Amino acid sequence: MLQPPIEPQASVIPEPYLLTTRTVTPDAADRGACSVDHQVVWPHAGTCTVTVAGRSWSLTPGQGLWLPAETLHRVRADPAAEVYRTYLAPFACTEVRTELRSAGVARAVRELLFYLAFNGMDRQRRFDSQRLCIRLIDDEVTSVLEVPHPADRRIRGIASAILADPTDDRTLDYWAWRTSTSSRTIARAFRADTGMSFSRWRTSVRISAALELLGAGTPVTTVAHRVGYATPSAFSAAFRRVVGRSPHQYLPHRQAL
C-alpha cells in the first residue's frame, strides 16, 4: 500500500497564476505522490495507469484523471509514453467539481497547455487562457477504464493472481476448490467489493493490460495472446464492448495528437 509523504508537495504553480504543466518523469512515476494543488494526469502519447487507494485507471491520449489536492497516487507509464501533470490552484477551481474523476483533455486543450508552458505572453492573456483550460478540462469529461482492487480477504489472493497474469483463465469452480470456499461466495464477494461480476472484472483487468501494450506499439495479435484471448477477433470484440472502440485505434500511429 502507498504510504503518504510527511507533507504534500508544495505548490509548483508560479505566483500569481492558476496552473502549470510538467512532465511525469520515470523516476517520479515510481513513487507515491500528492500535492497541495489539484492535478490532472494525462498522456499525450502512449498510455499510463494511475492508482489511488486500490483503484486503477488506464488512460490514453484524450483522457485524464482529475486528482483533488492531497490525493496520494502513483503513475505507471511505458518508457516510450509521454505523460504530463497539469497542476491547478484550488482557489481557481471553486466553480468546478473537485472530486476524483475522469476528465477529458482534448487535442485543443493539450495544445493550449503546451503553448502556455513554452511561450511568453502578457499577464491578462495568460490568466484568460488558463481559465479557459480549467473550464474545458472540466467540461470535456470522458470515460476511462477503472479496475478496482478488491479489499475483501476472501478474494484478494485471486485478484492478485489475475492482476499479475491477465491470461489466468482459471474458473470460479477452480478458485472455490483452491480456497475451500463456494463459487457462489466468491462471486458475491467480487460483486460486492468491485461492483462487477468475476468475469467482468477479469475482462477489465485484461483490457487495462491491453491498453498499456497497445500504447507501447505492440501489434494487436500479440496483445490478444498476451492478455488471454485465443484469437484477435475474440480480443477485438471484448475490447470494443469495454472501451467502445477498436484496439487498432489505440496503436501509437493511430492516436490523435
Image (cartoon, rainbow, N blue to C red):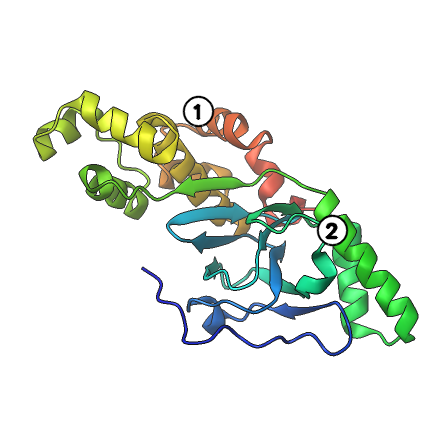
Q: Is residue 181 above or below residue 20?
A: above
How many C-alpha atoms fall within 10 Å of the one at disc 2: few (<14), some, or many (≥20)? few
Give the residue at x 48% y 72%: 28
Residue located beneath label 2 in the image? 95
Foreground mark, 2 or 1?
A: 2
Residue 250, horizontal then vertical, whole percent: 59, 42
Using the numbered discs, state the Cα–Cα distance from disc 2 to disc 1 in whole angstroms: 44 Å
Residue 189 has which mark?
none
User: At numbered mark 1, what does the secondary structure look like: helix, strand or loop?
Assistant: helix
Mark 1 residue type: Ala
Residue located beneath label 1 in the image? 234
Which quadrant is the N terminus positioned in?
bottom left
159 on left or right of 137: left
Give the residue at x 74% y 43%: 139
Q: Is residue 209 visible?
A: yes
Give the residue at x 62% y 75%: 11
Residue 143 versus residue 203: which sits nearer the camera? 143
Residue 95, horizontal then vertical, whole percent: 74, 51
